[in-house]
Amino acid sequence: MRVLHTADWHLGKTLRGVSLHEDQAHVLDQVFKAVVEEGVEVLLIAGDVYDKASPSEAAMKLYSDFLERVHEQTDAAIVVIAGNHDSGQRLGTASKLFDRRRILVRGPIERDETPLILEDEHGKIAISALPYGEIYSARRAFEAEDIRSPEDVLRAQIEAARARVPDDARWVVVAHAFVTNCQPTETERRLSVGTVETVSAAIFEGANYVALGHLHRPQTAGGNAIRYSGSPLAFGFDEAGTTKSMTVFDLDGQGQVVNLKTVDFEPLRQVREVRGLLEDLVSEAKANPSDDYIRAILLDDGALIEPAAQLRPHYPNILQTLREKKQDLVMSSAGRAQSKLDDPVGVIGEFLTYVRGEGATEREEGVVKGVLDRPVLEDAK
Amino acid sequence: MRVLHTADWHLGKTLRGVSLHEDQAHVLDQVFKAVVEEGVEVLLIAGDVYDKASPSEAAMKLYSDFLERVHEQTDAAIVVIAGNHDSGQRLGTASKLFDRRRILVRGPIERDETPLILEDEHGKIAISALPYGEIYSARRAFEAEDIRSPEDVLRAQIEAARARVPDDARWVVVAHAFVTNCQPTETERRLSVGTVETVSAAIFEGANYVALGHLHRPQTAGGNAIRYSGSPLAFGFDEAGTTKSMTVFDLDGQGQVVNLKTVDFEPLRQVREVRGLLEDLVSEAKANPSDDYIRAILLDDGALIEPAAQLRPHYPNILQTLREKKQDLVMSSAGRAQSKLDDPVGVIGEFLTYVRGEGATEREEGVVKGVLDRPVLEDAK
């Protein structure tokens, strides 16, 4: 059975206030094309369909038109789960009215986690759809007060799901979670502190493939069989220049993942950084105008008059202008009131002595100096 | 074929700030019960499922749970259209993924208005679902710039629908509109001025039954075959004391509406008015406490201290307190500065002379006097 795995569409998202609607329509066209051209038999969408709980009508139309197109123009089955950005209730409204043979949309967590059962020439494949759920909703759904962490939630979901997988079926799990040791981007990092929010890949034991959503970089979370497809678009400048993709593979008769490949997305506009003296950047922009989403990092020393306004005629989607100030530049402006800034390591030492009774160790001083020596990025408007 | 027709649920509605959630769950249980007990083969929901375009999760859960219950526990087909209170886009999201044999949910207007085709022992029945649509969206859908009124919209929808009804099929239309000469309640009256917003019943020609939504009073709009089921609950004090119902009938082999009856709703709480001197009303409330939604009209002349607070211990859902002031009571307080108020007809005459150069005619004076002689209702807090 040929499977396409995608996730983290974040329909309705804006990038520094600019709507990504067209960009998202463009990549969804590519998902549709891949479903057709790769002969996909089941399409997995592993959460964060939308960027917020109550999406705009335009975002819902993108989603709806896409699913209806797949349903009407292909034979692919469809499995969708809610991610942490979605409202499970809204995504799952009336979903039990969907054609049961081909569609499983799971909004809120269900105690009775019944899989979609598909068949190929080797037999049955059970697909369990495990939406993201908060600890409290999982406690209610499973009537289990001992659910205390995201891993507890997912473990309860997996156990409920496993109990309903037929003995003779291969098993695919779709989930939205942060698996330990995987690499988040800035967007997801903000949502988690340390490892409290992560789950161990070991809890997926027994699944032939785990289609994950949540992290926006395509990556494995344990061999080829536990994977993040990643998002179809870069949603921040920390992802500038990265290639986004969806994952396509075959599940063979033994339940092995074979012929796995990634299909790259071609974004309508790149998210990218340019870097240099303003004058050089303006020349470059004039020579090669672009509607990419651009962040300009200016290396100039002196005063600049509205640098973004100089670049915008050639870069209509310039979203941010930063100046890379060197440390000695900051220092040079220090007056009498800032004299202590001449010795920032000393100030930090004083602070440490104040709060814990002793100054910085040699190792700590090393960390501080390392940070201070880095260039400083600053909004330049 | 046995048909149940309901409409105007307005899920998520509040009555003067109080949620009607429980009341709405209570009446939906009665719709479900009627579907089962009456052996209903198709359930028609003629718009205004929700009270607003972006409904709460709780409202969506009510809708979703109800439809899923009907779909899973009965054999009834389901037809739903968006009303003017719904967002067609939101209500219709992914609706083409629904089980096509039994479900038709129509959100936005469709140029290609394909009916749900059901069969009974006499042959086919085509059900056309015509959602409410604004003039501009209808112009876009039909690429017709000459659509200028709600009647033009509906006429375009009906023509599109009629073209897709099989020749040998009986035809049922579900629509959300204000048919000329029908009786609105206060809620719908606010939305329309004169007859600009109304449509003639004649445009439904050829349909064996027209299931209408929009007006909240159960009523016919032309024989038994063009009907408003009305809303399941009273949504305002102007509907106090009215009985709400759904409509059940059989469509016979000749397409005649037979065995038509209304099934009354039993509200969890009544919407009602009490009227009298505060002291008497308090005694009555003590003797017969009630959690009905109550508006008290006080006939007392003098000052009253927080009348609602005196009634609330016995009427926890008292929503409004009004005082019925007699005209002579207003007059009695008139001082020197208000001397002109002794002759309100004269004041109006002066105003008319000022704005149009001549005073009130005899007929106009009659209207003014008629209004002045009516009792005045006023918020008393």
Image (cartoon, coloured by chain):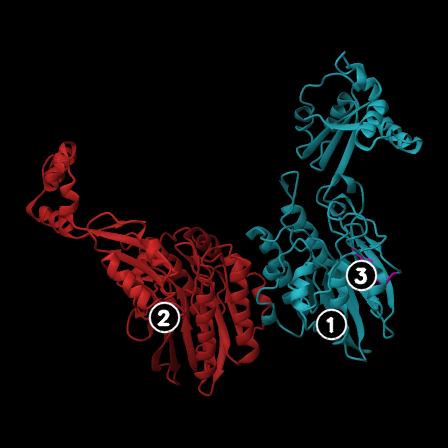
Chain colours: A red, B cyan
Q: Nearer the viewer, mark 1 or mark 3?
A: 1
Q: Pinpoint the chain carrying mark 2.
A: A
The answer to the question of whether label 2 and label 1 lie on touching residues, with beta carbons closer than 8 A, is no
Q: Height in image: A27 above or below B319?
A: below
Q: Pinpoint the chain carrying mark 1.
A: B
Q: In which quadrant of the rendered image does the N terminus of chain B lie?
A: bottom right
Q: Nearer the viewer, mark 2 or mark 1?
A: 1
Q: In which quadrant of the rendered image does the C terminus of chain B lie?
A: top right
Q: CA distance from mark 3 to mark 2?
A: 51 Å
Label 1: how many Cα within 10 Å (few below 14, some 14–19, many 20+): some
Instruction: From the top left corner, tell me how far across and down residue B334 is, in percent.
Output: 78, 15
Q: CA distance from mark 1 to mark 3?
A: 27 Å
Q: Which residue is mark 3?
A: B248
Is A275 left or right of A73, judged from the image as shown? Answer: left
Provide the secondary structure element on which disc 2 rests. loop
Instruction: From the top left corner, tell me how far across and down residue B123 is, in percent.
Output: 80, 79
Residue A229's disc number:
2
The answer to the question of whether label 3 and label 2 lie on touching residues, with beta carbons closer than 8 A, is no
Number of callouts in the render?
3
Instruction: From the top left corner, tell me how far across and down residue B205 is, in percent.
Output: 85, 68
Instruction: From the top left corner, tell me how far across and down residue A83 is, in percent.
Output: 43, 60
The magenta region covers B224-229
Q: Which residue is mark 1?
A: B160
The type of residue carrying mark 1 is Ala
| Residue A207 shows in the view | no
Q: Nearer the viewer, mark 3 or mark 2?
A: 2
Residue B292 magenta-highlighted: no
Label 3: how many Cα within 10 Å (few below 14, some 14–19, many 20+): many
Asked if badge 3 and badge 2 are on a common chain, one would say no
| Residue A239 shows in the view | yes
Asked if badge 1 and badge 3 are on a common chain, one would say yes
